[in-house]
Structures are given as C-alpha cells and as structure tokens.
Image (cartoon, helix red, strand yellow):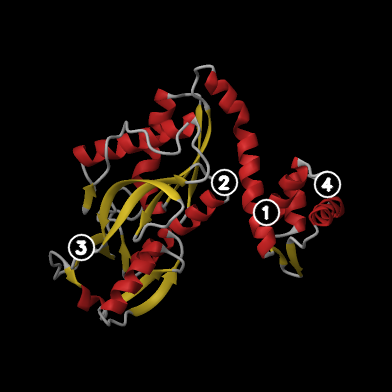
Amino acid sequence: MNLKLRHLHYFTTVVDAGSFSRAASIIHIAQPALSRQILELEDMLGVELLHRTARGVRPTPVGEALYREAANILRQMERLPDVVRSARGDIEGTVGVGMSSTLASFLAGPLMEACRTEFPRIKLRLITADSIVLKSRLDASQLDLAVVFEDLPSPGYVRHPLFRQRLYLVHPGRPADAAASVPLERLAKLPLILPTLPNVTRLLIDRVFAEAKIIPNVAGEADVFSSMLSAVQAGMGLVILPKGDLSDVAGYSALFAVPIEPALFLTAAVIASHDAPLGRAAAMVRRILSRLVCEIMERAPPPGAEWMGGSPEATGPGEQ
C-alpha cells in the first residue's frame, strides 16, 4: 500500500465540499484527476468510501471513520511547525476556536483583542455555529476548542464549565403588561419561533415542554441567531434564547427579554477533544478565554448568568 498524505487531503476535501466539482475547484486540480485519486485510495483500502449520487457525494460508514482519522492526521501535520517553534520558547500557531452565535456576541471581540495583545504570534481562526455543529467539527479535528452551550454533557470531551445561563423569552419590544417573568404555561399560548433541530436550546425546550405536557404554538423555525431575531423584529413570533440582553447585538437592541419561570438553564463550557492533546497555543487560548469570562462575570455579568468556572490559570487534562 502506497498511501500518501495527498490522498487524505483530497478525500477530506471532497467530503467537506460534498461534491467532486467543488472539491476540485478548492484544490485546483482537474475533476477527472481528483476522481482517479479517490478511486486509487478506495482500491488501496479495498472499501467504498463515498456514496456517489447525482446530487453529490457523502461518506459511507467506513468513509466517516476514515474522514475522522484523516482530518486528525492532517491537523497534526499542520500543527508540526507551530509545535517546533513553540518548543523554542515562543508560543505561536493557528488556533481554531468555535463559538455559538449567542456567546460570540460578547466573547469573540474581547478574546481576539486579548490574544493579539498578549500573544501576537497566535492566530485565531474563529468559527460561529450551533453547539452541536461545533462538537462535530471538534470530532473532525477542524477545531481546537469550542465554547458551547450544553444541556447535558456529551462524552468524549475535556470540558471546563464557565457559567450557567438562564433562558429568556424575547419580545419585539417591551410589552405593555410586562411582568418580571413569564410562566412556562403561558408559552403554550404564544407564537414561538424555535431553533431548527439539531440545536441544544431546542432540545432543552422540547424536553421541558414534553415533561410539562405542554404543546407549543410553533409559528416557525430558524437555524441562525440573526434569523430568529429578524423574525421577532418583524412580528412573526417570539423566541427563547440563552440571552437576557440584546443591547450588544447590532440592529436588535430594542428587543426585550423576559426570564422564563421556572428558571431554565444551559451551561456554557469550553471543550476540547479528549483524544487530541492541546498544543501550547491552544492551551493558552483556553486560559485566556476562561480568564476573560471570569472578569466579565465579576465586572458586569450578563443577565441570568452565574459564574461556575474554576481558576482561569488551572491546567486541565489534554494540555501539552
């Protein structure tokens, strides 16, 4: 078997792109040549790695397994120069950090500024997506760290809990009869714009409604934070978010949030893969992130947020 890194690079690119034509454009290789490389890889391994359809391609179960391992190998190869440079005493390298949209609204800017000031040789690559998507990118070694909301912890990650965040019902403006909180039972009578599954907030909402035997009035669904806020602003319905103050969200500062009663919480945590040790740069970014959240919670905690992290300087498992 003469398996080369290029085979792994080509294969992961095809899977990420979802088609040979898009992958060929990304890699800058002719599509027939790319197809031959993937066929050569399948011949060497003796398995079918991709389901090929008129709509594109998707990995077979064996292909999924290879994709995870290949992405991890390529990520490790990409990090080698940074590891060597860091071994000389300089902390540098590219660190992929994922954040949910809600968390990124108040954490992304301060994190980038702190990293640039303290470690100018660390380059952050920020990705914004739902917590479930971010976990899948960690699994695929596409990210080093992710700051996510969790209802129930998922196995397979090293996690540092940061804070608990209460859920709020978001209105287009302050209601004339605004109360200090909104009872769970009242939500059944209100038109709701719910996050599209899979989504951690939606999973919590569905579970709580089911336990309370409440059937929600679903006026629509949206899979992006900004889309949900736009729907509220347009008067299409109300949304439930782990965020009690929209003043820091450009264009939506007039939206009004009311806490739900009984209190519903998600846990914000910074997580990393249990199987891939963090390099020095990623470990330092995690420390900076934890320290920033600690400072925010001491200085001006967001509404409904309760600090639960340990020492920002603590070294956790998985650090090199």
Res 240 quadrant in image = bottom left
Q: Nearer the viewer, residue 110 or 201?
A: 201
Contact, CB < 8 Å: mark 3 with mark 4? no
- Number of other residues with Cα within 10 Å of mark 1, as a class: few under 14, some 14 to 19, many 20 or more: some
Mark linked to residue 1: 4
Between discs 1 and 3, the one toward the N terminus = 1
Pointer 1 with pointer 3, Cβ within 8 A: no
**What amino acid is at disc 3?**
Pro
Front position among marks 3 and 4:
4
Q: Which picture quadrant has residue 175?
A: bottom left
Disc 2 versus disc 3: distance between alpha carbons? 35 Å
> How much space separates mark 2 and mark 1, taking CA atoms?
14 Å
Secondary structure of residue under mark 2: loop
Eyeballing the image, is 261 above or below 255? below
> On the image, numbered disc 2 is attached to which residue?
142
Q: How many marks?
A: 4
Q: Secondary structure at mark 4?
A: loop
Question: Where is residue 226 shown, x and y percent of the image?
Answer: 42, 58
- Label 1: element kind: helix
